[in-house]
Image (cartoon, rainbow, N blue to C red):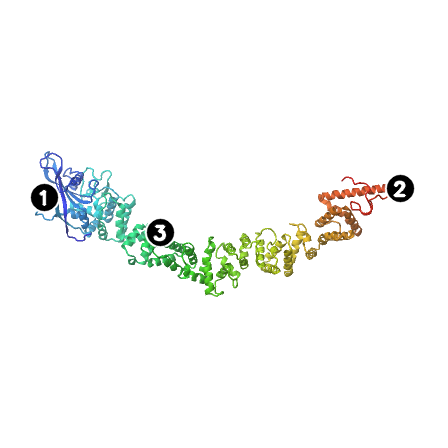
Amino acid sequence: MNERLGAERLTAHTAVLGKYPGRTMGYDVLRSSLPDGRAEVHLWRAAATGAPSGHEDPDGALPWRMFLGATEAAPDPGCARVEVSWDGTTDGTGAPSYTWRLTLLDWAATQRAALTWSGIDRARPADPQEPPADDAPAVLTVPGTSPDALAAVIDDLGYAWVSGVAALLLDGRQVALTPVPGRPLPDVEERVRVLDAVCALLPYACRAWLSAATWTGEAGHDLRLFFASTARTGQTEAVFGGAVPQQPRDGAPLAYLQDLQRLRAKNPDTATLVKHLLTAAEPVTAAPDPRAALDVLREADLLDLVIEEIRSGAARTADVARVLARYPSESLDDRQLEALTVHLARQARLGNAAAGSLLAEHWSARMCSLLARDVLAAGAPAKSFERAKYHLGVVHDHVETHGTVGFDDLFHALVEVDPEPTGGWAGSLIYMAENLWGRSTSPADDRLVHDPAVGRTWLGYLLKNEQRSLEPLERLVNRARSEMSTDATPGWLRFGGVLLGGPSAGATATDAAGFAEAFEDGWSRTLDIARLQRMPAALGLMWPGLWRAARQERALGYAVGRLVPVDEPVPGSVAADADLFCAATRTGSGTGMPRLDRLVDEEELQAYTTALLDRIDSDSELGRTALDTLVEGTPGRNGWWVIEQLTRSRPHLQNDLCERLYRRLTGHGRPLNDRDVPDYLMELVGRQYDMAWLRAVHTFPKAVSEGEPYEELARILLAAAPGGQLPARLADEVAVWTVTQGPYGLEQVARYMDSLAVGQPGLRMYGFLVQGGRREGLRERLADYSRDQQHWHAMVLARVRRAPHAPQAAVVRSGDEGRGSDGRRGLGRILPRRNR
């Protein structure tokens, strides 16, 4: 803006619309310095506002002044002034003959000097002594108007009223300034100043399309701002000197009005704002552009405004770009630059590519430190971590893609600060930098190794990632081995070395727990790492913590089963840990201890037993589990050997063992063949429960197989069942023997039992063998045998009764001597058996 208050010498085109004296025809352009009929466009537009209807209205008295901008008919920017006057002449009909005088200034010259309507209204010929020819441009002296003078008018009229009218113009309204009833309007020159003051609260470029008039008649017209007696249909009324007019409907015009009010509240010096708006002199189209006007207004207080909008969440990236273009970062304080930087980072994270480009364009070490400060200012660890992650992601994805280096600086500014605010998430950020963004984090390894909280957090993310790479862990393990003693190495890192195949010396179960419990599902993930690294021996260190975790998560047994497969050879201690863990979690495949059965080396068998004893000593529940599992199936040689070692080493387990054997031998649960049980255990169980029959179950089949006489067999059965009521297991053995050998042997044993004891235990034994409908086949066979015996004895008795008293030689048929076909001794068969 030209701030000089002196006059400007400008070339102006002129034209006159009127009637020749005495003529009756219509109005015509009497003279013009404009070519191609351009004068008619402006003159007829001015004439369309009407003419005075009389002289009784002082408000509408001539002269009228109009200021015209570009229109569709004359789109080139310009600044036209038209004065309507009457010199008292009349036409041929006696009607007043009015005159419209046009002064048209080139927009480029006008906006360069920031000339106002007040100044143009006071323009005078530069040399009054030499008037120009009718068809030649004139040189005018146009006085300047100071921002202070315009501001004084605005303040006098009322800032709220003037700003309200200006916003309505920006909203595309036709605004009629009407008088307060009974109160006269100011003179023409003052009205021009009023129109100029309203226009002064809009960017200067709006004068290229604005139009105004000190008065209009009753005719329709397209002027934007004018004085009139009343507002016509479609026009918006603003009472001059009255209440504040209505607000724009919405959008940019309303935002413009709100910003005018905000600026006023912040700075009551109206001249400062007017001076700023007078600088916005770039030409614009004929139609109002509220958004462009709003942008110009915002420039008056752009920095503070944008920062306020950032805080309210309403800032635009374009506004931030204008701020950074106008204010170098070194001219901004930390508060201002941090607000701008953080806003751009957040917008870039949300996908605003322009914000990312702008951040990269203005990136500096100071911006880096301000982003780090924003992270630490978040307070809660979860919030600060989210900010750290987002800011690093933006720098990686946006800043560095434009060739600007910034990630490493921000990363180290975040992870190398005081541990207190970042201890909860520095490890997460270190892991994320390498895993998510592929950045080298070696300089941060020192903190991982020496800060337990950071290291374990980092480890938690390693375990959480199912697609993990163990190269970072291996790097840390190698660094610790080369720079630190075993005792000084963090426990989780010592166990990490074991998982990677290193020596287990110095590593403890506590170290294993520290490693696995760095993540919620860490035990499962740790077992998975051990499996992939083919390190089943790590199970021993994991056992205590793993068993505690298994009480809540039984499925860990499946992971142990995958780590130590049954069909792969492993050391005895590892086999014992895996068998016992799978048994305790009921996740094994089948019954018993399957890995035990595969051991062939005596030393490994002893190691297996030692490991079981260690686990049993730490938890009595595991002792019962071990015995249950060992006795659950049919233990082989290794199983009975381990059972013996356990009960000999821990005598308190004998009672539990005997109970389990007793239940299985007596038919509770899965049956156990007593022949598979070592003799010493059968003897132990029999004594424990005072059950001779249990020994008989074991000794009776053995005596049969060794051909012991019937009397000895009878004694064994009497010892087990004095009354002849055989226990189920013993009855089974006797039934099998009877079916195999025939009923004769049973008869002889029964007779011996009856001879050795009172109460006919032998005879009663028959009933117990077949009671309850059991053994129908045996029942029928015993019945057939007894009927044969009965028939035979009946025939013998008959013969004896009929025989003469003289002695006769016994008649023995061939084949009757010795044992009969049904097992009887001494008598052959006389008649064939019936009812077979």
Asked which secondary structure carries label 3, the reply is helix
Residue 783 shows in this picture: yes
Q: Is residue 766 left or right of residue 296?
A: right
Hey, which residue is sitting farthest right in the picture?
806
> Which quadrant of the structure image shows residue 51?
top left
For the point 66% across and 54% down, the residue is 661
Give the numbered dot on residue 133: 1
Asked which secondary structure carries label 1, the reply is loop
How far apart are the alpha carbons under marks 3 and 2? 129 Å
Residue 267 at x, y percent in the picture: 26, 53
- Observer-nearest residue: 162 or 486? 486
Proximity of marks 1 and 3: CB atoms separated by less than 8 Å: no
116 up-or-down from 53: above or below: below
- Observer-nearest residue: 743 or 568? 568
- Classify mark 2: residues with Cα within 10 Å, few (<14), some (14-19) or many (20+): few
- Classify mark 1: residues with Cα within 10 Å, few (<14), some (14-19) or many (20+): few
Identify which amino acid the numbered label 1 is placed on: Ala
Residue 386 at x, y percent in the picture: 40, 54
How far apart are the alpha carbons under marks 1 and 3? 64 Å
- Classify mark 3: residues with Cα within 10 Å, few (<14), some (14-19) or many (20+): many
Q: Is residue 783 left or right of residue 558?
A: right
Q: Give whichever of discs 1 and 2 has the lower sequence position.
A: 1
202 up-or-down from 338: above or below: above
Residue identified by numbered label 3: 348
Identify which amino acid the numbered label 2 is placed on: Ala
How far apart are the alpha carbons under marks 1 and 2? 189 Å
Q: Which image quarter holds the C terminus?
A: top right
Hey, which residue is sitting farthest front in the picture?
814
Asked which secondary structure carries label 2, the reply is loop
Give the numbered dot on residue 803: 2
- Observer-nearest residue: 765 or 427? 427
